[in-house]
Image (cartoon, coloured by chain):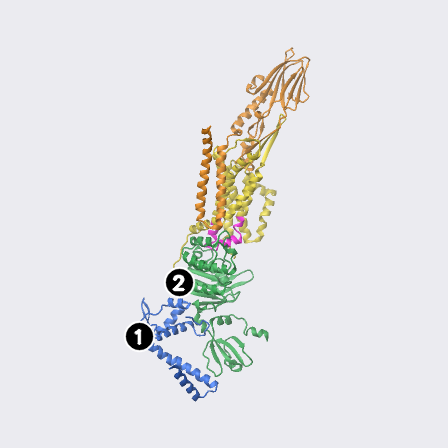
């Protein structure tokens, strides 16, 4: 009798290759989401104005904020959807077990988050090129990759971290929903309670506010993502394949 | 002329060449890949190429546009403005930085009163009372560093026109349309405003137009618009 | 070598006891038929063996490992059933292309040849296949994995007659070329009887018997003759099945034993599939009794 | 070459009979190799273990003999042995059935013998 011995690493790697290939469609949906975000960003995300000597002086900031909000929603959906029954069953049509399935899902989410973060960052340059075509206004020379590589990388990293954290949240949420449907309402409960209760506010404050630098904030994002992933793995360890 | 033409075509040719190479690469990789995925892969490849091109093109063409202040410059400007304002409020004419000086003039008054009229302009005024018995009024107009969101407003916003008539000083703002600047940033504002003090500082409006008058004590200054500090 | 070792295996769903008490051992490189009526627990047993679901109690070893969440079992076993699904982003050809990455013994040639033979469309999506074609594709997938433990759960559901016999033939030829342990569940014993070496008959979550096909054929014997004579003969015997032929003649199936030859009573052997049917029947008597 | 899977006769018996028939028909000669269990399995679309069982019966009856690592061979006396066996078993059984059927149809012994003789003539 010949038994092939696949190590966990091998199986995870094969699953990752398979999943990235199989989930390419989600990246196309990401592009759609980004383009939608870009279109809505054309008028600027925030502006300030003042009146000086009878002249209205206005600066309109065109940032990646709208795009990142859209992409975050996409990330939540992505993390959630790969835990659903259909996706889970297709994974188990090939060699895998609970751990390798989780690990490969996590790696796929990381890969997709990096892709989403970097493209979100770069997509902003489309705005920089397109917006001047439609508006006859002044432009401020803006920090670009060559001018300010460090801050560009930091902000790219922040986008990746944020998207990863949200997709991890979606993944945990989806895993819990798979275990019991009642968890469906968890997200809604969280959305209501986090900003309204004292502890919720404290948690939010701890993560998002009072950070010395963007780097610290990003580290916090990644830590939260890791916590979400670990929780998802622990809670799904004894999960059966329901097909 | 012909030299210039060739030079301007070269970068375009270069970009076309890069696109062609990238498309070739994308095609050869996607040939090894199945049909259903091929359209997805094409879309992704094209999107990435477009993004990279956007960056390259932006970096190459970004020549016009206002320089924005760095936060370091901002801080020094704010400090200089503050020093000026301090000196202005304290009637220390000698300390007023002459590089802010825009215009100065003197005027022989006919009567005993001087009226300062503001026609929509936006200035701060201070008066230094002199012991002179003459009718002569000295006036200086200053503008400190005027920035908003890192943009030099001083350059764009015209100074009020100044009209000196008998015993009147009329400052009329030139009603300029409006001035809008677009500013792009890589940063996520909803994080940077919370976390980045520099960014908050950069959004402040700084700068003013000042009028400094030296007026003999016996002259009555009529200041209907309440420009004066005290 | 023993590939599967089940001891008092139980599986309980919320209200239902799917497996009551399963004890059997499966030797390597045999084709075994897992036979049972609908709801006997065949699918549950196969899913436990494949590591998809957990046992409730008892002991189960596949390749000397508890199969649940076990990578070794997953890498060396395949369960082909009609709920098998593949991503919609992959065409059938793509699936066959990624499979060798997962299954080290994947037989590309066999997969491609079978694929061509059954005229499947390589650009189709798995979820869009008709029921029969899906079963065919799943079967090709299952055979090509060459897994040491290959399990088919009702593989011929939805296949037409020609494909069925082709499937059984393909299974046999591939088995001869590459002997391995094959477990086929079905409630149609007759159509695949010739392929099987052993039969594992389960009923209501319990193993009724696990024997070779020939032993099962010897399990029971049928007596047919005048009602009164047959009834006299079968007094005190274990009756598996009775059927009133007409007003005078009766057909009774009993456990095999030496029956004296009596004039007018014919003694018939009983086919394996009939034995299985009778043994797992809860009713003495048959459908005819309903219409009395 | 089809087996009757629905038949009440076990498959391995049918396999054994088939080989015997082949030997009688001189398609397998003395000391010649017969099909292996796998060849039989393929030929008849049956499980190799079942085919092996058919071969084992013949080995037990010494119609075939095993050569280690080489396979199964036809015993020198195989054909005669089979014919002998058939005579003893098959023919006797068939004769018994014939008589049984004849009695049911009220055919007398005389008439039966006449019938057999007649058939004998036709075969010549």
Residue receiving disc 2: C179
Name the one closer to the observer, A126 or A201: A126
10 Å crowding of disc 1: few (<14), some (14-19), many (20+): some
Instruction: Write down the chain letter for disc 2.
Output: C
Helix, strand or loop at label 2? It is: loop
| Chain A painted colour | yellow
Horizontal and vertical percent position of residue C29: 40, 63
In the displayed structure, B222 sits above or below C72; it is: above
Helix, strand or loop at label 1? It is: loop
Please give the letter of the chain rendered in blue.
D
In the displayed structure, A89 sits above or below D77; it is: above
Horizontal and vertical percent position of residue C249: 53, 80
Magenta segment range? A79-105
Please give the letter of the chain rendered in orange.
B
Asked if residue D14 lies in the magenta stretch, the reply is no
Q: Is residue A119 visible?
A: yes
């Amino acid at each position: 009798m010949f038994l092939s011995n696949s190590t966990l690493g091998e199986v995870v790697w094969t699953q990752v290759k398979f999943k990235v290939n199989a989930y390419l469609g989600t990246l196309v949906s990401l592009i759609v989401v980004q383009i939608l975000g870009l279109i809505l960003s054309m008028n600027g995300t925030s502006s300030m104005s003042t009146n000086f000597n009878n002249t209205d002086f206005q600066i309109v900031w065109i940032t990646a904020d709208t795009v990142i909000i859209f992409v975050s929603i996409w990330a939540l959906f992505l993390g959630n959807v790969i835990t659903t029954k259909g996706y889970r069953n297709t994974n188990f049509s090939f060699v895998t077990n609970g751990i390798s399935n989780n690990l490969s899902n996590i790696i796929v989410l990381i890969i997709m988050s990096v892709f989403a973060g970097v493209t979100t960052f770069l997509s902003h340059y489309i705005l920089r090129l397109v917006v001047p075509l439609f508006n006859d206004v002044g432009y401020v020379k803006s920090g670009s990759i060559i001018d300010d590589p460090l801050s560009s990388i930091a902000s790219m990293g922040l986008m990746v971290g944020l998207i990863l954290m949200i997709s991890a949240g979606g993944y945990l949420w989806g895993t819990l929903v798979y275990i019991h449907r009642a968890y469906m309402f968890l997200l809604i409960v969280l959305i209501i309670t986090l900003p309204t209760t004292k502890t919720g506010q404290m948690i939010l404050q701890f993560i998002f506010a009072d950070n010395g630098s963007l780097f610290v904030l990003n580290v916090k994002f990644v830590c939260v993502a890791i916590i979400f992933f670990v929780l998802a793995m622990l809670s799904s360890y004894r999960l059966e394949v329901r097909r | 002329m012909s030299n210039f033409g060739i030079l301007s075509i070269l970068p375009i040719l270069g970009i076309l060449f890069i696109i062609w190479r990238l498309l070739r690469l994308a095609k050869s990789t996607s040939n090894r890949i199945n049909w259903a995925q091929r359209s997805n892969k094409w879309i992704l490849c094209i999107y990435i190429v477009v993004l990279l091109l956007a960056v390259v093109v932006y970096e190459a063409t970004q020549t016009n546009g206002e320089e924005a202040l760095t936060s370091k410059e901002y801080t020094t400007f704010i400090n200089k403005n503050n020093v000026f304002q301090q000196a202005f409020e304290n009637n220390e004419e000698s300390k007023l930085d002459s590089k802010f000086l825009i215009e100065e003039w003197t005027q022989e008054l006919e009567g005993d009163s001087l009226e300062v009229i503001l026609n929509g302009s936006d200035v701060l005024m201070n008066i230094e009372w002199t012991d002179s018995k003459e009718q002569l009024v000295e006036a200086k107009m200053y503008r400190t560093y005027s920035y908003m969101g890192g943009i030099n407003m001083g350059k764009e916003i015209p100074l009020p026109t100044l009209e000196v008539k008998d015993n009147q000083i009329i400052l009329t703002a030139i009603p300029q349309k409006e001035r809008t600047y677009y500013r792009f940033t890589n940063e996520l504002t909803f994080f940077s405003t919370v976390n980045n003090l520099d960014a908050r500082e950069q959004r402040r409006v700084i700068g003013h137009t000042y009028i400094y008058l030296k007026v003999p004590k016996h002259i009555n200054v009529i200041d209907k618009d309440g420009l004066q500090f005290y | 070598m023993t590939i599967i070792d089940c001891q008092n295996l139980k599986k309980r769903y919320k209200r239902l006891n799917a497996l009551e008490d399963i004890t059997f051992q499966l030797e390597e490189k045999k084709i075994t038929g897992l036979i049972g009526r609908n709801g006997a627990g065949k699918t549950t047993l196969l899913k436990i063996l494949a590591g998809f679901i957990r046992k409730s109690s008892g002991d189960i070893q596949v390749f000397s490992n508890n199969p649940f969440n076990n990578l070794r079992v997953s890498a060396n076993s395949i369960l082909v059933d009609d709920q098998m699904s593949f991503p919609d982003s992959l065409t059938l050809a793509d699936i066959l292309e990624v499979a060798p990455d997962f299954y080290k013994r994947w037989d590309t040639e066999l997969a491609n040849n079978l694929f061509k033979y059954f005229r499947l469309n390589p650009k189709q999506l798995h979820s869009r296949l008709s029921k029969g074609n899906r079963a065919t594709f799943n079967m090709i997938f299952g055979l090509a994995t060459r897994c040491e433990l290959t399990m088919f759960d009702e593989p011929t559901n939805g296949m037409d007659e020609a494909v069925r016999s082709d499937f059984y033939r393909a299974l046999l030829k591939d088995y001869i070329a590459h002997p391995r342990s094959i477990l086929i569940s079905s409630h149609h014993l007759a159509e695949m009887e010739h392929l099987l070496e052993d039969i594992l008959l389960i009923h209501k979550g319990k193993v009724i018997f696990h024997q070779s096909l020939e032993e099962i054929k010897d399990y029971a014997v049928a007596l047919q003759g005048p009602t009164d004579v047959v009834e006299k003969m079968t007094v005190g015997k274990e009756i598996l099945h009775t059927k009133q032929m007409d007003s005078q003649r009766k057909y009774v199936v009993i456990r095999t034993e030496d029956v004296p030859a009596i004039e007018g009573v014919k003694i018939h052997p009983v086919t394996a599939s009939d034995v299985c049917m009778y043994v797992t029947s809860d009713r003495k008597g048959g459908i005819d009794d309903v219409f009395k | 070459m089809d087996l009757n899977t629905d038949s009440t006769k076990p498959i391995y018996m049918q396999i054994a009979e088939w080989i015997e028939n082949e030997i009688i028909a001189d398609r397998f000669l003395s000391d010649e190799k017969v099909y292996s269990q796998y060849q039989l399995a393929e030929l008849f679309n049956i499980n190799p273990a079942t085919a092996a069982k058919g071969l084992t019966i013949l080995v037990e009856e010494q119609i075939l003999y095993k050569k280690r690592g080489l396979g199964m061979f036809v015993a020198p006396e195989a054909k005669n042995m089979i014919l002998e066996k058939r005579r003893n078993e098959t023919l006797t059984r068939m004769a018994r059935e014939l008589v049984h059927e004849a009695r049911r149809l009220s055919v007398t012994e005389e008439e039966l013998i006449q019938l057999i003789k007649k058939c004998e003539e036709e075969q010549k």
